[in-house]
Amino acid sequence: MAAACFLFVTSLRAQTPAKPALTAAPDAANPNQQFTRAAQPGGVAISPDGTTVAWTLRGRDGAALHLTDVANPANDRLVKLEGATHCSVDNPIWSPNGETLAFRSTCTGDQSKPDQNQIFLWSKASGEVKQLTHLTGEMQQQAWSPDGTSIAFLFVENATRRAGALDAMPPWNGVIGEDGVEIQRVYAVNAADGAGHRLTPDRLHVYEFSWAPNSSEIAFIAANPPGENTWWVAKLYAQPIAGGDPRVILDPVTVAGPLHGLQIALPRWSPDGKRLSIIGGLMSDQGSTGGDVWIIDADGKHLVDATPSIDGTPTYAVWTSNNTLGFIEDRRGHSLAVDWDADKHSLLPGGEVDLGEVSVSGGPIKNAVTFTGANGGMVAFVKSSFSAQPEVWTLDSHNNLRQLTHVNAGRPAPPYKFESIEWQNEGFHVQGWLTYPKDYDPSKKYPMIVEVHGGPSASAGPRGSAQWSELGYFVFDPNPRGSFGQGEAFTAANRKDFGYGDLRDVLTGIDAIEKKVSIDDRRIGLTGWSYGGFMSMFAATQTNRFRAIVAGAGISNWKSYYGENSIDQWMLPFFGASVYDDPAVYAKSSAIEYIKNAKTPMLIIVGDRDGECPAPQSFEMWHALRAQGVKTQLVVYPNEGHGFTDPEHIRDRTEREVRWFAENMPPSK
């Protein structure tokens, strides 16, 4: 999960943890910083004529907006922003005629609201920048109307936090589920004067949207508030811009067939406005998108899976013509750019480019790329991996890859070997990543740390782990069943089976690694966050293979968790029923049910305002281990949600993790 949990009690609070006397790896808050953090390009947008790529660059002192000539990348210029220090710039988007660039920025000069984003416009003709909006609230995912007159975006008016369950939840207060509910709507402003209005009704929380080609309608994915709980049952709607009630195009809760009861994301209109594409599949988190590409007529008829039995996981898709789609596919650790026949449901000739063992990005949505149909079609994006620094790249219609920027030129590559590994288990072909320790000597035995990703509907990418490698560990990042990257059947293979088949995949992967490199089997540790935190807690009751465990934001008791959280809707597709209808399936995967088997020392970490995996779950595990006489420690960080934000807390957490493994997996004497 990152899927699912609301904090149930308000009495669980903690003082700021004491900092242990330990020096961890270089920059424990971000152990890869020495290799990647100094220059982070993002927010990529290619102009409609394919001649210019706009992109942002985040640095220590602020952010910058670049314009790079595709034909001559050395011709790069900056969009000048007044007071662009210690503020952010992101999500540039070109107007349909390519004459104006809109972007989101906190560089407003308003010191009373230093984190408030506004939309700015840059004029190609004059080079001038002006602030278009003067709103108060959280805005994201802005998009030009095809006619160029308006800009729409998701907006939470007077927001107290970012929408979603990752941020720290507000303290409990008032009527639960009724008071203080913040609703995200589609808001539009006139591109000429900034005059704006809401497009979607108060009764719907919107997650994603798309303009129709005629600019008179929008499609959007939404559900009844509170939005943290209902994305898993969201519907696809369409609504006229001029007003009127939205109409339902697709309801996965009631639709028949393989999409029934699953999740949908990324609505996109075909150029002729007759059809819509979506990503549909088993997804545990809003924003962690993966599944098949589905197509439905704009009137809600003729739903079809356009990528049946595809080997990987499409994560981001756009229409490239009325009959073709382009999408990014995650396939066993590789990112692929794919051209697809929307009618024949097959690969176009020469329509697959393996971008490598890399991650791609470029926009506010996972794996977003920017595309233009001009000049034969071109795609722009940021490409990065553990050994390749993030840079902006282009891919032309002849499948030629080209590096456009060199902002990290000359920076050292990590001094650690990093590779993809694959193995077989119980009929599944499984993939993961192995990072070698610094100065690896095959004649020596090394400890290893296994890191299980969150989700479970997600995947560990080619990021590596510099921190643990620097300290002399192998690091294994598996993508067991339940992960993206190997088709929908693989993603769904852990339904009603959390902690069993996926754990066996992990253990079999460890066996495969031990046949390949010099691992000290007596010094293998396990860690993970969110779903990885659950796996870390549950594994302690199923195997003694691990000598030390660090469980972050985990779940120890699915039965109590169901009643503690306020985002229970995510659980039904995975467990098949509510806990009240089938408590046995929840008990089956609960560490508390098997706590007598647990012997492994466990450090447990959680934020006290975690809205995905509530702190009481960590308290349950800690209390149970302590009652069994198992070495354990619980650290609760104040005012932190599911994703930590305080740099001192991140540093402290990292140092505690380093210390726990060092103390509980000591070298043999």
Image: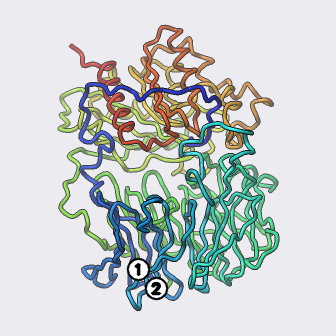
Does residue 347 appear in this view? no
Q: Position of residue 329 (x, y in %)?
A: 51, 60
Q: Name the residue furthest front.
A: 112
Q: Is residue 99 above or below residue 632?
A: below
- Which amino acid does the dot numbered 1 rest on? His
Residue 432 is left or right of residue 9, and the answer is left
Q: Earlier in the sequence, mark 1 or mark 2?
A: 2
In this view, the residue in front, 576 or 444, is 576
Give yes or no for contact between labels 1 and 2 (Cβ–Cβ under 8 Å).
yes
Q: Which residue is mark 2?
A: 376
Local secondary structure at mark 1:
loop
In this view, the residue in front, 34 or 472, is 34
The quarter of the displayed image where residue 5 is located? top right
The quarter of the displayed image where residue 168 is located? top right
Local secondary structure at mark 2:
helix
Q: Position of residue 622 (x, y in %)?
A: 51, 19
In this view, the residue in front, 597 or 184, is 184
Q: Is residue 601 above or below residue 1?
A: above
**From the image, which quarter does the C terminus lie in?**
top left
Q: Which residue is mark 1?
A: 398
**From the image, which quarter does the N terminus lie in?**
top right
Q: Position of residue 529 (x, y in %)?
A: 48, 36
